[in-house]
Image (cartoon, helix red, strand yellow):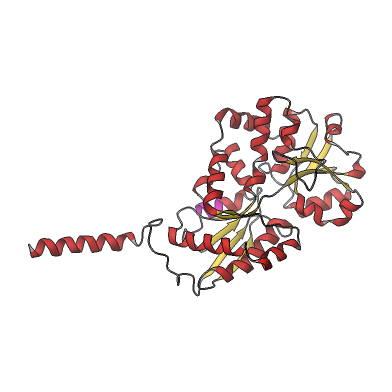
Amino acid sequence: MRMTSFSGRCVALALAASLQFVPGTAQAANPNFYAGKTISLVIGSGEGGIYDLGGRLMARFLEKYIPGHPTIVARNMPGASSVVATQFVYNSAPPDGLTIATVQPTVVLNKLLDPSAKYVSEKLSWIGRVQPVTLVGLSWTASGVTNIRQAETQQVIVSASGATGTSAIVPWALNKLVGTRFKVVRGYVSQAPQFVAMERGEVAGIGSASLSDVLEKADWTAQKKVTILYTIAQHRSSLAPNAPALTELAKTDQDKKVLALLGSVSDVGQTLMAPPGVPKDRLDILRKAFDAMVKDPDFAAGGKVFNMGVDPLKGADLAALVSDASNAPAPVVERLRAVTRPQ
């Protein structure tokens, strides 16, 4: 009897010990884990612009709210509209809670369009959303293009980063579904050089840009140097009320569903995430710290400097939003893939 009881206790103790090392199990949070640690924050875009500036602001404030106050070091990893950074986080970064990332929301859409992309959006550990991101298509007014209908009668050259981001796929989709004549010039590292190219007259516009970054250039709007041709969303933005949402340009109900899915990136917005498989206790710590950070008035004030607002979404709700977008009806996804192929 004693041997049986002793053996049973050993098995129970061994099982309990083993559970401490299984990622995602419901162990109690270790408040001392992050003390003395360094967290790497990967920014999936080049320097400048709302993703870079927002990422660096998060790095500065998040340290304050993570128990143990680890050092957070931000580094840029641009490429393919944040796909390079997302694949790194998904496949190479250890799931230990010491790597986090902020990437463009188009990575969720990209996985739908390219199933071979080496990540699964729903499996990433979503920490939270700072704000929805309103993206718009632009033209330089001096180019002579001042509304979307003109793009149906004349060729309009617009810049883009890679073939996976909205700066390329939205003009291509509009060409197929609406009859526009956008010509997309790819290869720009980030949004900042696209702005320069438009000012210099190298291109007539940009296929997709952050509205907050556009509004930051006060002379552009005050002097009407740019025209917002469309909003990449399901509804118009109050900040650009004259620019039609993508869904308004659709000619059929089916096309409207396709353009609505294309516009869903706005709701995903500016986020923070981590690799899949981060232990639950550490993900909980990061989510709680994020929730506290976005309530900090100093964080909000810091974002206002570059037109970043705060309209947060908790990690669990963000994960549900990503899951919904990632499981869109197959016919709509197939149609979207067909109209966003490189032209």
Residue 72 lies, in percent from the top left, at 58, 68
Left or right? Give the position of 198 relative to 109. Answer: right
Query: Closest to the observer: 100 or 129?
Result: 129
Left or right? Give the position of 139 relative to 36. Answer: right
Residue 159 lies, in percent from the top left, at 78, 44
Quadrant of the snapshot with the C terminus: top right
Residue located at (81% from left, 57% from top): 216
Which range of residues does the magenta coloring cover? Answer: 87-94
Residue 182 lies, in percent from the top left, at 79, 35
Residue furthest toward the left?
1
Up the image or down, 291 lies above or below 190; here it is below
Residue 262 falls within the magenta-colored stretch? no
Residue 93 falls within the magenta-colored stretch? yes
Residue 298 lies, in percent from the top left, at 68, 68
Residue located at (76% from left, 50% from top): 211
Up the image or down, 29 lies above or below 51; here it is below
Prevailing secondary structure class for the magenta stretch in the rendered image: helix
Query: Closest to the observer: 159 or 39?
Result: 39
Quadrant of the snapshot with the N terminus: bottom left
Up the image or down, 299 lies above or below 50; here it is below
Residue furthest toward the top?
252
Residue 188 shows up from this direction: yes
Left or right? Give the position of 145 relative to 130. Answer: right
Residue 341 shows up from this direction: no
